[in-house]
Image (tube, rainbow, N blue to C red):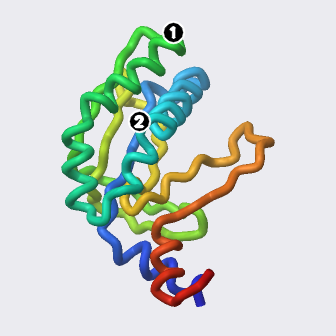
Amino acid sequence: MLCLLLPLLANAIDPLRLHVIANSDSPMDQRVKLAVRDQILAEHGEDFRVYKSKAAAWEAARREAEALRETADDALRAAGVPYRATVEVAEAAFPDKQYEGLVYPAGDYDAVRVVLGEGAGANWWCVMFPPLCLLSDEGAGEEVEYTSLLLEWVGQLFQWE
């Protein structure tokens, strides 16, 4: 039953996305994009688990935009690249995407956009609210435990354990 509910819930929720756009499609810039993503999620990912509404998450993102930019810039400096990041909290166009078995349709979505340098490369995104940001298994080998506020909420709704 959960498998049937998840796509409906995911598409019905008005998400706030985290969108990291690489400087270019060069292999180095794509690696840098992932390093920035990792740093942002490590330093700020848990912060967004506390919000119970998208409006609260949106306001927090607007308040924290400068801190998010500083985090991205720290990762860019550590990578030794000459460009920096800009961060905006705004509506942005997204294509169709399958994410962890769910299909998110193309459309305009509210997003925290982290643009690296020229922002001319491939992007990475996840759902910040409800918090569904998951790191892919790229270069992994480590065991990863995934959690989801949405799944916890559904479990409470149906009293699953």
The mark tally for this picture is 2
* Amino acid type, label 2: Ile
Residue at (50% x, 31% y) in the render: 39
Disc 1 + disc 2, Cβ < 8 Å = no
The image shows residue 131 at horizontal and vertical percentages of: 43, 58
**Residue 30 falls in image quadrant:** top right
The image shows residue 123 at horizontal and vertical percentages of: 46, 40
Q: Is residue 146 above or below residue 66?
A: below
Instruction: Point out the image quarter for the C terminus.
Output: bottom right
Of 77 and 124, which appears nearest the observer? Answer: 77
Secondary structure type for disc 2? strand
Q: Residues within 10 Å of mark 2 (few under 14, many from 20)?
A: many
**Residue 140 falls in image quadrant:** top right
Residue at (53% x, 35% y) in the render: 38
Q: Is residue 156 above or below residue 47?
A: below
* Amino acid type, label 1: Gly
Residue at (40% x, 68% y) in the render: 105
Residue named by callout 2: 21
N-terminal-most mark, 1 or 2: 2
Residue named by callout 1: 80
Q: Residue furthest right?
A: 141
The image shows residue 138 at horizontal and vertical percentages of: 69, 41
